[in-house]
Image: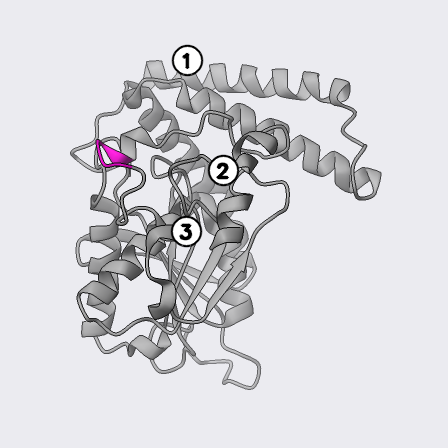
Amino acid sequence: MSDRPEVTTASWPIAAVDVAGLASNLVGAVARLPFRTPWRGPSNPPRNLAVSTTRELTRSLFGYAASLPIDEFRALERVLDAVSGQVLLPLVASQGVKVEEDNLAGVPGLWFRPSPRRGDSENAPPISEGALSPGTIVYLHGGGYIGTSPRMYALFLAHLARVTFCAVFAADYRLAPEFPFPAAADDILAVTSHLVSGGLAPERLILAGDSGGGGLLGTVLRRISMNSKRRPAAVLLFSPEVSLTLSEDSITDNAPFDILPWNIPVNSYLHGIDPDDQRVDVLLDDLSGWPPTFLVYGGDEMFRDAIRLL
C-alpha cells in the first residue's frame, strides 16, 4: 500500500524517529508485563505467558501506529513491510512454499504456492492456480481496513497454502483513509473477475479473510450476488470484523483481553457511510446465498458477539 504513487509517506529521518518511538513503546510493554501476572490464565503457565506477551506487544504496536499522522503511519508501515520481506519470506521459502509477486487486474499482491503433493513427480512445478491445484484462495488480509500488508501475513499464508495444497493470492488492496469505501471491495472484485476470466472455475475459487479483511469479504460476496455472478466454492473467515457499529457488549466486555486497541478506528474507511449501511454491515445482508463457510473466533475477542450473530 505504501508503495503506491498516490500515497504520501514521511521522510526517512521522520520514519527513523517513529521506529525509535515504536521500539520505546515495545520496551515499555515488556516492562509492564510482569505486573499483569502474565503466567495466570486458562492454560499452562508457558502458554499463558506467550498469550499475554503477544497481547501486550500487539496492543502497543497498534496503539502507537494509530496515533501517528497518516504520512508517518505509512512510512512506519513501509519499514515493517520491508522487515517482513527480509525476515519472513526466507522462512517461507525454507518450508517449501514459493512466493511470487504479481499484479492481477491492476491489483498488486503475492502468490504463495505450495510444493507438489506427495505422489506427484519431484520435478513437477510449484502448484499454481492451474490444473495441478485443487483450488485457488484469494486472501483478504486484516488490519482494520487501514493497515498491514501481505508480507506481514507470510507465515500464516504459507501455512494455509501447505495444509490446503491451494495456491493463495494475497491481494495488496487499497486502504483507508487514502482510499475509503468502496475501493478495497473494487480491488478484490477485480482480482476474482480476472482469475475467472482467465479460466479458473468459480467452483475452485475460495475467498478467505480475517479481521477487517473478513468484513470486506462480506461486502464482496454481496456485490457478487447483486451482479448475478457465480459464487465462489467456499469462504474462510478468521475473527472477522463483520459489524462496524461496534455496539455489541463484547466490544467493551472483552477490551481487557483482546489484542486490539479499545478505540477501534472505522471512520476513515466508512468516509461518511453509515455503519448500519447494508453494503458494509455483513449482519444486515441476506446470507442465504453464501457458499459453505468456515468461521473461527475466540471467546475473549471484542468482535465475539457480532460473529456469534453471523
Residue 106 part of the magenta-drawn span: no
Q: Is residue 265 visible?
A: yes
Query: Which element carries disc 1, helix, strand or loop?
Result: helix
Q: Is residue 155 visible?
A: no
Distance from disc 2 to disc 1, alpha carbons, whole Å, reads 38 Å
Q: How many numbered callouts?
A: 3
* Foreground of the two, 163 or 304: 304
Q: Which residue is drawn at the image coordinates 31% and 38% (left, top)?
A: 275
Of the image marks 2 and 1, the number of the one nearer the N terminus:
1
Q: Which residue is drawn at the image coordinates 20% and 45% (left, top)?
A: 183
Of the image marks 2 and 3, the number of the one nearer the N terminus:
3
Q: Which residue is mark 1?
A: 17
* Foreground of the two, 184 or 19: 184
Q: Is residue 256 above or below residue 154?
A: above
Q: Which residue is mark 2?
A: 248
The residue under label 3 is which amino acid type? Gly
Q: Which residue is mark 3?
A: 214
* Residue 227 spot, x, y in % from top left: 17, 66
Distance from disc 1 to disc 3, alpha carbons, whole Å, reads 33 Å
Query: Which element carries disc 2, helix, strand or loop?
Result: loop
